[in-house]
Image: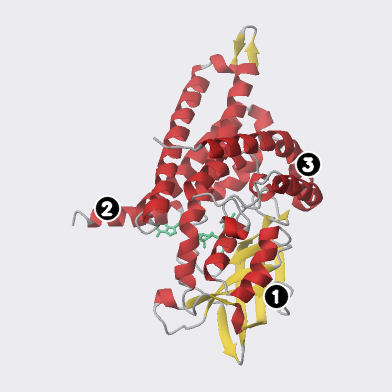
């Protein structure tokens, strides 16, 4: 059904081997010591990725990337998703990949020089600062953060949380209200804020499922108190904040869904290996139990079906644009997040006590990927928006 070129097959095979040989062996150090401790080693792996010519798979060639289509990058994302540090090693990790995309699309020449190029080279990291603790993030048009003109500057005041990867980032793309009188979707703008600007405070890395994390692997609460940035740091047009945010979400959801399917594949492999090797009684393994057999078959069907849905959606975005694919995008977002949760839960159960430890990546994903059903639009919001359109066509 899908044509995968020989070149892409070669890329996928090289990435698969790199993930197995170079990244999976680093996982235990990542779980035990955190991201920052591993960063020097990861930098060496990033250099190896550059030497292999596989850096920035999702970025157009004119910006130094591989120039893969969304469909092709989806397949890459699935390989990289098999380890929590895969995307970072190839510089296609959230939230940087989304910021690269909007900077390439909407950045001025000066913004590209100052913010985009160091990001593409892997010298800096960035974050995307939209959600606020005081408002329902599932309706981001409600927002208190403001950016007010003062001469050639914006003065930004606001309180944000769940800004992923703010710890150690060079800059944030901040969503702030620039015109409170405008319509709901034209009130806010995206403004680039270097995080060494006076008035910016990282209040804390929020403890998520018992782990505050660090560096790229963290989610921060932030304050912007009278933060002054030049008006030239506006991304795109004033009032276009939501339109630009929407743009990053379509491709971003393909990246996430294929990453989740990579996680599913790894959890599936671990499940099967453990099941055939775990002896329950002489001559009888876990794999001989029908419950486990059912889970293996059901998981396989669910993962394969989910992958088809995502790849069809990616093709549709590539060929028709994300507006045409908006229902498919919502469907895959909640459906694949649900498959992920089921596959991880079963993998953990099959591993018994071992599943609760950090001796496999299952527990890490079980903790952190529960959020898949919440970020980039909670399940219910996607279901509501798809159902509304479907039912609308019957009214
Ligand atoms: C790990 C993680 C990383 C994140 N990273 C970022 C980031 O980098 N930058 C950023 O700006 N934000 C980020 N977020 C925030 C994320 O986008 C919000 O958590 C999300 O939009 C939901 O908003 P909320 O948490 O305020 O939940 P609320 O809006 O308060 O919703 C709470 C719950 O209500 C239910 N609900 C909501 N709307 C409806 C509805 N219409 N119908 C029925 N039920 C509904 C859902 O179950 C939802 O989970 C991240 C969140 C997490 C957990």
Does residue 332 lie above or below 1 as drawn?
A: below
Instruction: Give how far across and how far down residue 167 sits, in percent.
Output: 72, 62
- Residue assigned mark 1: 200
Q: Is mark 2 within 8 Å of ligand 1?
A: no
Does residue 319 lie above or below 275 as drawn?
A: below
Instruction: Give how far across and how far down residue 328 sits, in percent.
Output: 37, 49
Mark 1: secondary structure? strand
Left or right: 195, with 102 as reference point: right
Mark 2: secondary structure? helix
Q: Residue at x 59, y 72 (%)?
A: 174
Q: Residue at x 58, y 23 (%)?
A: 272
Between residue 179 and residue 40, name the one nearer to us.
Answer: 40
**Mark 3 crowdedness (10 Å alpha carbons): few <14, some 14-19, many ≥20:** few
Between residue 132 and residue 24, name the one nearer to us.
Answer: 24
Contact between marks 1 and 2 (CB within 8 A): the answer is no
The mark found on residue 29 in the picture is 3
Q: For marks 3 and 2, give the CA distance.
A: 47 Å
Q: For marks 1 and 3, give the CA distance.
A: 31 Å
Mark 1 and mark 3 lie on one chain; the one further toward the N terminus is 3
Q: Quadrant of residue 246?
A: bottom left
The mark found on residue 390 in the picture is 2
Figure quadrant of the N terminus: top left
Instruction: Give how far across and how far down residue 191 sits, in percent.
Output: 58, 75
Instruction: For residue 206, say whether it is visible.
Output: no
């Amino acid at each position: 059904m899908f044509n995968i070129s020989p070149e892409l097959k070669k890329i996928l095979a090289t990435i698969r081997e790199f993930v197995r040989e170079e990244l999976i062996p680093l996982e235990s150090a990542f779980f035990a010591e955190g991201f920052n401790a591993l960063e020097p080693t990861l930098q060496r792996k990033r250099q190896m990725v550059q030497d292999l010519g596989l850096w920035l798979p999702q970025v157009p060639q004119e910006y130094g990337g591989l120039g893969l289509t969304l469909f092709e990058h989806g397949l890459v994302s699935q390989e990289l998703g098999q380890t929590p540090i895969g995307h970072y090693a190839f510089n296609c990790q959230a939230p940087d990949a989304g910021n690269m995309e909007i900077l390439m699309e909407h950045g001025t020449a000066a913004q590209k020089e100052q913010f985009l190029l160091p990001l593409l080279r892997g010298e800096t990291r960035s974050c995307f600062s939209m959600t606020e603790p005081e408002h329902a993030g599932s309706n981001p048009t409600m927002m208190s953060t403001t950016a007010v003109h003062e001469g050639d500057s914006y003065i930004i005041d606001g309180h944000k949380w769940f800004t992923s990867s703010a710890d150690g980032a060079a800059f944030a793309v901040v969503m702030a209200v620039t015109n409170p009188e405008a319509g709901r979707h034209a009130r806010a703008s995206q403004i680039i804020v270097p995080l060494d600007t006076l008035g910016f405070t990282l209040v804390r890395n929020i403890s998520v499922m018992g782990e505050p994390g660090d560096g790229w692997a963290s989610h921060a609460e932030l304050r912007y108190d009278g933060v002054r940035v030049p008006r030239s740091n506006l991304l795109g047009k004033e009032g276009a904040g939501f339109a630009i945010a929407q743009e990053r979400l379509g491709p971003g959801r393909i990246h996430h869904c294929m990453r989740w399917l990579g996680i599913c594949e790894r959890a599936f492999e671990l499940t099967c290996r453990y099941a055939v090797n775990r002896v329950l009684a002489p001559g009888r393994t876990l794999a001989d139990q029908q419950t486990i057999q059912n889970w293996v078959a059901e998981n396989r069907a669910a993962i394969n079906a989910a992958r088809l849905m995502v790849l069809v959606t990616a093709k549709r975005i590539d060929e028709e644009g994300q507006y045409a694919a908006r229902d498919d995008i919502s469907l895959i977002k909640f459906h694949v997040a649900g498959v992920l949760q089921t596959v991880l839960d079963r993998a953990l159960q099959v591993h018994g006590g071992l599943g609760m430890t950090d001796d496999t990546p299952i527990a890490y994903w079980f903790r952190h990927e529960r959020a898949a059903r919440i970020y980039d639009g909670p399940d219910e919001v996607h279901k509501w928006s798809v159902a509304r359109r479907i039912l609308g066509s019957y009214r």
